[in-house]
Amino acid sequence: MKKQKRLMLMGCSLILGLSLLSLGGAKSNTMTVHAVTTPASKGLSAPEKVDGTTTEAKSVTGNSTSGQVTYTNGTNNTTTATYKQHKYQTSTQAKTSFATDENVTETNGTKLKLSDGTTATRQGVMGHVYVQWQKNGWNVTTVANTDQLTTSSVKQTNKTVTAVANKVQKSLKTNQVTTKKVTRGNIVIYNGSQQKPVNQISWQQSTKVTQVSGNSAETTAKIAKDTLN
C-alpha cells in the first residue's frame, strides 16, 4: 500500500512539472519584441552607425519623403551630426530648395594650385580665409580662422591654406564624396575641431536634396559617403 501511494505521488509530481513547463512555454511564445527605429526602417539613406567612430543614430524622425536623423557619440546625448533628406515633385523644386544651401562661386581672389592640379581661389573675409574650388559638380569651400594660421607673410599664408585645402580634398576623395556625380553639390569644411555642427555637405540628385552637418569634418564626410553609395 505504501508503495502504491509513493507511485501516485510521483505521478502527480510529474504531471505538475509538465503543466508548469507547458505554461512557461506558452508565456515565452507570447513575448512581445519591440522594433528598433533605424534610418532604414524610415526609408532614409543615412547609416545607423558611422564606421570607425563612436557616432551612432540617436533619433530618427519623418520618412523617405522628408526625414531627419540626429547622431551622438556613445553615451553623450549632445548632437554631433545631423542628416536630412527631402524629396520634391520636380527637379526644379529641388533646385530651388538646394539654392538656400549653395555657396556663391567665387572667381575673384588669389589663385592657388592644389596637389592634383585643381585651381582654387583664396579670399580673406572678416578674420577667415576661404579656399574654394569645383570638382565633379561639387562646390568645395574650406574655412580657416586667421588666428589659426600663425603666418607672417602672404606667401606663407597661401602655402598654409593650400595645405588645409589639400587635406580636405584628400579626405573627400578617400570617402568617395567628390568622386560621386550629383546634379549639384555644396561642401563647407572648417579647419580644426569644432564645437558645433558647422561642417556641411549637401547635394541634389534629381528630385532629392540631402544635407549632412557635423562637428567633425571626417565624420560628416563618412555619413555622406554611406549615403551616396
Image (cartoon, helix red, strand yellow):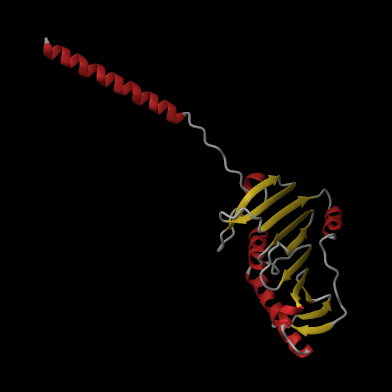
- Identify whether 150 is placed above or below 221: below
Quadrant of residue 111 in the image? bottom right
Q: Residue 3, percent across and down?
A: 12, 14
Q: Residue at x 20, y 14 (%)?
A: 8
Q: Residue 103, percent across and down?
A: 83, 67
Q: Residue at x 73, y 53 (%)?
A: 84
Q: Residue 83, percent across and down?
A: 70, 55
| Quadrant assignment for the N terminus | top left
Can residue 69 be seen here? The reply is yes
Decide which of 198, 57 is in the foreground and name it. Answer: 198
- Identify whether 15 is placed above or below 104: above
Q: Residue furthest top?
A: 1
| Quadrant assignment for the C terminus | bottom right
Left/right of residue 37 with respect to residue 9 in the rendered view: right
Q: Residue at x 71, y 69 (%)?
A: 178
Q: Residue at x 78, y 59 (%)?
A: 204
Can residue 176 be seen here? The reply is no
Quadrant of residue 100 in the image? bottom right
Quadrant of residue 183 in the image? bottom right
- Identify whether 94 is placed above or below 198: above
- Counting every numbered tag in the picture gives 0
Left/right of residue 75 with respect to residue 4 in the rendered view: right
Q: Residue 225, percent across and down?
A: 65, 63
Decide which of 197, 88 is in the foreground and name it. Answer: 197
